[in-house]
Image: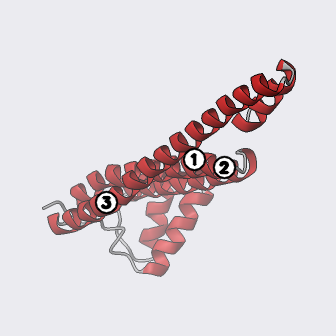
Amino acid sequence: MPKRSTVKALPQSIRDWLDSALVENNFSGYRELEDELKKRGYDISKSAVHRYGQKLEQRLASIKASAEAAKVISENISNEKGVQSDAILEMIQSEVFQALMSLEEIKEEDDPMKRLAALSFVGKNISPLIGASINLKKYQAEIKARAEAAAKEVDKVVKKNGLTEETAEQIRKQILGIV
């Protein structure tokens, strides 16, 4: 079993300080951080701080990307329920993929039971996500089919009642959501 992270063994207050220092230094200056930890009474190598810093940077980047994606979705995507739901599902799928990737990290540093528990969690939670995605696609296909059927009915009414082709085209566009 791999050796446990020396940084994770630090008291929470020291790890909080280290997290802040890593962010403030833009994830650089590992030698200085090692020296500062020694001054505080902790013998943590530059390499251990660097490994911890890389993982923290990846987590923060993932959180930032998720927050930005949520902002883009809310600001730029139409209010159509299906479009927003699709975008949110894609974002969740991306997060599940990131969780699967982080399982490799658990493999490197922790016991096999923790990895198995994380894998089980991902497995249980991916099934409803896939189901939601399938249901959304079915719903979108059903709505599209209904709109196309309504547009065909408009064509029949147009021919029957003598409306102009231009008027019929405007009605079709409204029904199909093109305008």
Amino acid on which the number 3 mark rests in the picture: Val
Q: Which residue, given by chain and number where applicable, does mark 1 sit on?
A: 87
Mark 2 or 3 closer to N-term? 2
Which of the 4 image quarters holds residue 99?
Answer: bottom left
Q: Which mark is residue 122?
A: 3
Label 2: how many Cα within 10 Å (few below 14, some 14–19, many 20+): some
**Residue occupying the point 40% across, 50% down:** 98
Residue in the foreground of this view, choosing between 74 and 164:
164
**Residue occupying the point 43% across, 62% down:** 34
Label 3: how many Cα within 10 Å (few below 14, some 14–19, many 20+): some
Position in image of residue 157 (x %, y %): 75, 30
Residue in the foreground of this view, choosing between 20 and 155:
155
Task: Determine contact: label 2, label 1, CB under 8 Å.
Answer: yes
SS type, badge 2: helix
CA separation in Å, label 3 and label 1: 20 Å
Position in image of residue 175 (x %, y %): 73, 37
Residue at the extreme top of the image, as rendered: 165
Please tell me how many numbered marks the rendered image carries: 3
Label 1: how many Cα within 10 Å (few below 14, some 14–19, many 20+): some
**Residue occupying the point 70% across, 53% down:** 74
User: As drawn, is 49 to the left or to the right of 141?
Assistant: left
Mark 3 or 1 closer to N-term? 1
* Image quarter hosting the N terminus: bottom left
Amino acid on which the number 2 mark rests in the picture: Ile
CA separation in Å, label 2 and label 3: 24 Å
Q: Which residue, given by chain and number where applicable, does mark 2 sit on?
A: 73
User: As drawn, is 132 to the left or to the right of 74?
Assistant: left
